[in-house]
Amino acid sequence: MIRVTCLILSLLVPLQGWAEQVPAGRSEIALSFAPLVKQAAPAVVNIYARRVVEGRRSPLRDDPFFSEFFRSFSAPRPRVQNSLGSGVILSSDGIVVSNYHVVGDATDIRVVLNDRREYGAEVLLADEEADLAILQLYGAVDMPVLPLRDSDEVEVGELVLAIGNPFGVGQTVSSGIVSGLARSGTATGSARGYFIQTDAPINPGNSGGALIDNAGRLIGVNTSILTRSGGSNGIGFAIPANLVARFVDQARAGKKRFERPWSGLSAQPVTSDLAAAMGLDFPEGIAIAELHPSSPFAEAGFMSGDILATVEGQEVSTEAELEYHMAVRGPGARIGVERIREGERETLHVPLIAPPEVPARDEVQVPARLPLAGLLVANSNPALLGELGQRQPAEGVIVWEPGPIGARLGLRPGDHIVAINGAEVRQPADVPGLLAAYGRAVSILIERDGRRLSFQVRL
């Protein structure tokens, strides 16, 4: 009998402990993001931007012959474009991050907080390629702030919230998970590079809004969706917080253009066939295809054919990932890069440098008395190509500014001038002389995006 009583008491003890853990109310049963939203939402703002754009102008209006037909027509009127998006406050003195496609080239920016306060703002630093812009609110003090998280620590499967102003309906919160990391070449719009993928619904107006983790920290800035219908299909992309932090640093330092380190190489992903040919057990990293003589990777000991496996311990599978990891560290830093050569692995340290001015630009402008007057040409170098937003290495003489006649002809900044009337162009100083030698009939051979194009002009 005593044994039976002891057995019953031993069974009741855990039941009593369990009874003490019974939820006291419905709020303890339901999973809720409400406390997290209350903490984070005040730092996410609505942005209304306005820009004035010139009306469409016929390319024939300035033509010496066809301009006579436009005398009776008034000049095209400027148009006002409005854009709607979101932003995130990152500092108590009013530093805000948003997308370039929301505020880039805006002439008037109005920022509205969650509590309906309104501020004017100016753009401190904007970059179309990264699709990021850093704003400063006028007269802002004691602003609510979202802390940044190290986005390299983010893992697939984490719960996230997307906060923004979709379709202008007001601040909205949607939930999801991190669906993928290191997405490159998949985002729409002007952005390119490295993204965090999420299935949290993102719609027009969410651009520039916050993607936060379950601790209320910013892990990315929502930038675009992948869609065929125009609606959210659960494939959204966010720019990682580590790159945002670098933009804020450069904006505070007074930079007007975002400075990226220069790799001086082109690379290709390692496929299964390439891995087998190189004696690897499985595909990994990227293989160097071309290496500029002045590249910091060449200085560190890399050669064409080497495989870059990791950067600071992070795996890389595309050239865009390499450039991202370089960008978040910035010029002046050093990175550890794992190299694979003939099956041997070694970590080399690469100094990150700004694109060099080698060779010198030697800019030359075509004078008014010659065909293509106003055309500005220069020697191609990494710094110049960086300013033009071109990543592929190019040598020779390139178009820096096409001038009015060159623009009508179809020349673009970055075009490589190969020959004029069949004569090879070796240096910028050759261009005026070749144009003068052939009078008013000119044939120009250029190279653009790997293709050769010929332009004919008679003046």
Image (cartoon, helix red, strand yellow):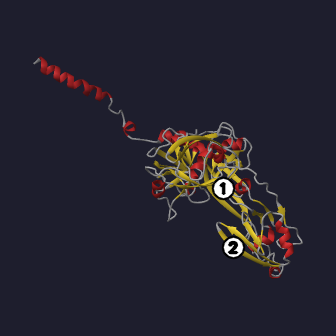
In this view of the protein, can residue 95 be seen by the observer? no
Q: Which of 322/12 is in front?
A: 322
Above or below 383: residue 154: above
Mark 1 nearby-residue class (10 Å; few <14, some 14–19, many ≥20)? some
* Quarter occupied by the C terminus: bottom right
Spatial distance from mark 2 to mark 1, Cα to Cα? Answer: 27 Å
Q: Which badge, 2 or 1, comes first in the chain's sequence? A: 1
Mark 2 nearby-residue class (10 Å; few <14, some 14–19, many ≥20)? some
Q: Which of 445/86 is in front?
A: 445
- Residue name at image x 74 percent, y 59 percent: 380
**Residue 188 location, quadrant:** bottom right
Q: Which of 304/46 is in front?
A: 304
* Quarter occupied by the N terminus: top left
Above or below 22: residue 438: below
Q: Residue furthest right?
A: 369
Is residue 1 shown left or right of residue 139? left
Amino acid bearing label 1: Glu
**Residue 408 location, quadrant:** bottom right
Q: Name the residue beneath numbered marker 2.
A: 453
**Numbered disc total:** 2
Measured as percent of width and height from the top left, residue 205 is found at 58, 55
Q: Residue furthest front?
A: 342
Q: Secondary structure at mark 2?
A: strand
Q: Secondary structure at mark 1?
A: loop
Above or below 430: residue 334: above
Is residue 280 shown left or right of residue 79? left
Amino acid bearing label 2: Leu
Q: Which of 273/43 is in front?
A: 273
Q: Which mark is residue 128?
A: 1
Is residue 251 shown left or right of residue 179? right
Measured as percent of width and height from the top left, residue 148 is found at 58, 40
